[in-house]
Image: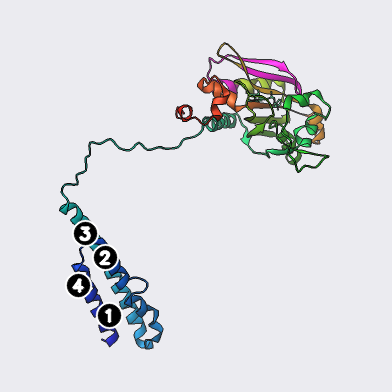
Amino acid sequence: MSSMQEQLKNLKDEAIIALNEINNKDSVMQWRSKYIGRTSKLASVLKNLKDIPQEQRKDVGQLVNAIKKDLESAYLQRIDDLNNLDIDTHPSVEIDISLPGMPSRNGGLHPITTALNKTLDVLSKLGFSSIEGPEAETSKYNFDSLRIPDDHPARDMWDTFWLNASDADDPLLLRTHTSPMQIRFLEENDPPIRIAVPGKCYRYEATDATHEWMMHQVEILAIDKNISISNLKGTLQSFAYEMFGLDAKIMLRNSYFPFVEPGVEMAVFFRGQWLEVMGAGMVHPDIIKAAGYDPSVYTGFAAGMGIERIAMLLWDIEDIRYFYQNDLRFLNKF
Ligand code: FA5
């Protein structure tokens, strides 16, 4: 055995003896840095391994590592022993297992997220796959391509948050509805089309029990050969029954949106009156034509539904503003 190996073995013996004499945790920490820490003798042997004659290098290296491992486990064992000693030497510290535990405060999904997920689940069963689009939108997509020109009175229906830093010819805004994704998707994809587009929309308007300035919509768009208004009606009816149950009272009545012809809206009976949950209609032939398809061959329907309104129906919430007041007394119920 080389003298180096002998020295190492002695060092290990010394370390073990010193460790066994320690009876508090602070000294164990000091012991650790003296014998196995970064500035310990062991560490310096490892660092200087290159100065050791070639033929011994491997053996010494292995020995240092083995000793280090032994000392590490002796150290952990000692900590364990000292911990046990703590309990044994302080019998007055009792653990009262009858005390109630600390309640754990788990987070949960916001009701609007749950309502949105449920909506997308039902739509997926009806054949619609989800895709998202931009919240900062250009006027072209939010209005013009949807047949809502600058001076059109329908622009008033979507009171708008305009963004600075905009191109004067095609100003940026916070989208007022998810309908611009109809145009964006049609530009890039060919029929048959069945999409659902979830996302936030913004309107610069006064809030009340059924209106927020920020809300979520899900747009649906179906384009194919031979789609008729009965497909729209059937889809909306199946959707409503699946979402709200077979005893839900639903109504389709005519409505006006420049990008559909004819247009409808769907309302659900809620707390003694009809609550409008979505606008819908047959995609206007001009929009099909602008996308490059023959409107006498391809037809389709679209709808835009309000998720906050759907959530009101799902949980019988009387005022839409509760969703965004961040009041735990409300949110904890979900
Ligand atoms: C639209 O936004 C049309 N883009 C819907 C559409 C799509 C029509 C496709 C035809 C074809 P409307 O402004 O009615 O329409 O809004 C649609 C739904 O969004 C409403 O029924 C309502 O559920 C919800 N909604 C609209 N404004 C608000 C608001 N301020 N707060 C809460 N929900 C709202």
- The nearer-to-camera label among 4 and 1 is 4
Which residue is label 1 attached to?
8
Residue 295 visible (yes or no): no
Residue occupying image coordinates x 62% and y 36%: 130
> Marks 4 and 1, Cα distance to the nearest angstrom?
14 Å
> Which of 279/3 is in front?
3
- The nearer-to-camera label among 3 and 1 is 3
> Which of 228/217 is in front?
217
Which residue is label 2 attached to?
28
> Which of 275/120 is in front?
275
Q: Quadrant of residue 323?
A: top right
Query: Residue 169: x and y, percent?
Result: 83, 39
What range of the chain is rendered magenta?
Answer: 238-267
Residue 17: numbered disc: 4
Chain-order first, disc 2 or disc 1: 1
Which residue is label 3 attached to?
82
> Which of 17/258 is in front?
17
The residue under label 2 is which amino acid type? Val
Query: Residue 91: x and y, percent?
Result: 15, 49
Q: Secondary structure at mark 4?
A: helix
CB within 8 Å, label 3 to label 1: no
CB within 8 Å, label 3 to label 2: yes
- The nearer-to-camera label among 2 and 4 is 2
For disc 1, does the CB lie below 8 Å from ligand 1? Answer: no
Residue 46 visible (yes or no): yes
